[in-house]
Image: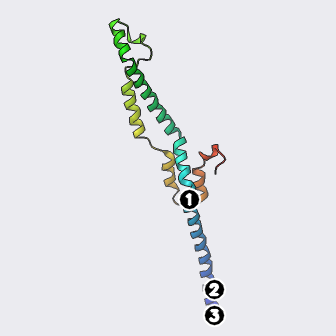
Amino acid sequence: MKCNYEAEVEGIKKENVALKASVDDLHATKTWLLLEGARLLAKNIHKGREMTATVAAVNNAMSAVGVNSGLHNGYLHALKLKTPDSAVPLLNRNAAEELSTAVACFDSLTFPVVEDLSKLVDAPLFKIKEALTFASSETSEK
């Protein structure tokens, strides 16, 4: 009977070691996500092509709207002289529409890096780090 208890105690000790390792891993994961993961996520969003392309589209459309506003009086003058639209430099009659489209695109922007993270809930920490490393690969940060 004593031998049976010793085997049971040994099994419990092994299970305890495994549970301790699991808790330590969870703590390391939580610590890394809070200290580094969130920063890398923000950097990935900031440097992602989705953000860059969308901000560029909004910026370009805003510039066109601004240029058009500035050209308004000049265009009115050109109309008085019966100058065709094509002869008025930088005039874009669709600028306001293009700005609205760019803003709508920005408002509906999604970030694949965020969506990909939700698939890593059960992944080990090294896999989560791999998913977030492309932004930091441009610098010496890891």
Whichever of labels 3 and 1 marks the residue nearer the N terminus, that label is 3
Q: In the depicted view, which residue is nearer to us: 22 or 100?
A: 100
Q: Position of residue 43 (x, y in %)?
A: 55, 46
Q: Position of residue 72 (x, y in %)?
A: 36, 17
Contact between marks 3 and 2 (CB within 8 A): the answer is no
Contact between marks 3 and 1 (CB within 8 A): the answer is no
Q: Is residue 50 left or right of residue 107?
A: right
Q: Position of residue 24 (x, y in %)?
A: 59, 68
The type of colouring in the image is rainbow
Give the crowd class for mark 1: few <14, some 14-19, many >=20 residues within 10 Å: few
Q: CA distance from mark 2 to mark 1?
A: 33 Å
**Which type of secondary structure does the marked residue at label 3 adopt?**
helix
Q: Is residue 38 left or right of residue 13?
A: left
Query: Which amino acid type is shown beneath numbered disc 2?
Result: Ala
**What residue sits right under mark 2 in the picture?**
7
Q: Quadrant of the N terminus?
A: bottom right
Query: Which amino acid type is shown beneath numbered disc 3?
Result: Lys
**Which type of secondary structure does the marked residue at label 2 adopt?**
helix
**What residue sits right under mark 3 in the picture?**
2
Q: CA distance from mark 3 to mark 1?
A: 41 Å
Residue located at (41% from left, 25% from top): 66
Contact between marks 2 and 1 (CB within 8 A): the answer is no
Whichever of labels 3 and 2 marks the residue nearer the N terminus, that label is 3
Give the crowd class for mark 3: few <14, some 14-19, many >=20 residues within 10 Å: few
Q: In the depicted view, which residue is nearer to us: 133 or 68?
A: 68
Closer to the eye: label 2 or 1 = 1
Closer to the eye: label 3 or 1 = 1
Residue located at (52% from left, 42% from top): 46
Label drawn at residue 123 = 1
Query: Which amino acid type is shown beneath numbered disc 1?
Result: Ala
Q: CA distance from mark 3 to mark 2?
A: 9 Å
Is 53 placed above or below 32 here?
above
